[in-house]
Amino acid sequence: MNKKSLRRSLPGKVLVPGALLALAVPHIAYADVADTTVSTPGPTTGPATTFTGVSSRADCADGLVSGGGVSQTIGTDTTRNGNHVLGTAPSPDGLTEYDGPTGVVGTDVRHWLAFGGSGGNASPAFSTTSYAVCLSTPRIRHTQVVMNRIAGPTAPQSAKIVTATCPTGTILLGGGARSTPASVGSLKPIASFPTYNDAAHDFGRRAAADGETRPDSWTAVGGIGGGHGNADNTTYAYAICSGDRVNTHGMSTRVHHRDVAGPTEGGTGRTATVGCADDHGQESDWRGRRPGAKGDRGILISGGAAAGGGNTTTTGFTKAGSGGTHLNGSFPSDSDGNPVTDGSRSAAYWTADIHAGGSPSPNTYSDVWALCLTMHHESGK
């Protein structure tokens, strides 16, 4: 049986209630240190022809994937309007995708794939780079991937929203989004963000806001421009969650969010950056120490991005003013929005890179999210 058919045989639903939560063992103190390392292979050239895609692979030599990202080189001439992100997603082996039945589709994932696509323009200057955020901590020795999908979008200038939710008793560590096929040149994921499967967040349509804690779901939005789609168009959402036997007592995650106006002018782009910070605004770095005191700082474990119409965290996701508005990046970065290098252990920010495409895009906003992990010392019970 090959890997793809094996994945298709996995049972599961998007919501997995009643997942087991391990009981704390008396007199055992949990190590509460954590570390993240960013793995990136450098750019993969392409796509060099229209209506095609390329993939870039990043692997975790140490630790497990908690999240991942993508950045693109788009060139400087008008062909740059046709280069867009096609996906950023976990992979079981660095080669194949989770595209079978929905639900829990994988465990202890160490690979991340980033996908770049072209529309009606292509250039040798195009490239796509993948980033895997690798989390190492004795507290989270196992993870699981939950996948959900929705058909579409197919109608011109439309979008489809889909949400994957972590099993009960686990914590969300990160997530991703994917749209297929690449041959539909105006089809692409236009948002990927943490959220909650509750009425207050419209069951994933409204993103987690700045300062909210312990989101349990990840939402992906697929958008299409003026081109016509087909019945095979699909949008995927992925949630990376702690393993179903991981004791999450004392762990928490906090969302940091920022949005900026634009880009609105055709052929232009905009970036937005946000980082993990404590209550006093100091950027995080508690690696190797025991957090737990007041004012704990978190470490960056994942992030998300959206090219939308604003108010994503208050009224829910809406499309930007142009069907051509797209993502060119969602990646771990420094405070200036530059992607971090391979092996970096100091990533504390996440950056979204949004492009308007070839047409004006009124009422457009660039949103970015950072998801940050804190753990309080367990003294044994």
Image: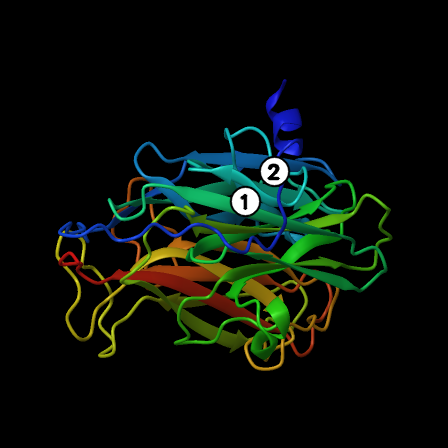
Identified at 33% across, 64% down, the residue is 252
Q: Which residue: 84% across, 61% down?
A: 156
Please state if 182 lies on the left or on the right of 59 as rendered. Answer: right
Residue 281 vs 61, above or below: the answer is below
Q: Which of the pair 323/69 is nearer the observer?
A: 69
Measured as percent of width and height from the top left, residue 178 is found at 63, 48
Q: Secondary structure at mark 2?
A: loop
Q: Residue furthest top?
A: 1
Q: Earlier in the sequence, mark 1 or mark 2?
A: 1
Q: Are marks 1 and 2 in contact (CB under 8 Å)?
A: yes
Q: Quadrant of the C terminus?
A: bottom left
Judge the density around disc 2: few (<14), some (14-19), many (≥20) Cα neighbours within 10 Å.
many
- Residue 65 seen in the figure: yes
Report whether 82 appears left or right of 94: right
Residue 89 is labelled as 1
Q: Quadrant of residue 280?
A: bottom left
User: Which label belongs to residue 98?
Assistant: 2
- Vertical placement of residue 313 versus 181, above or below: below
Could you say which is closer to the camera, residue 153 or residue 219?
219
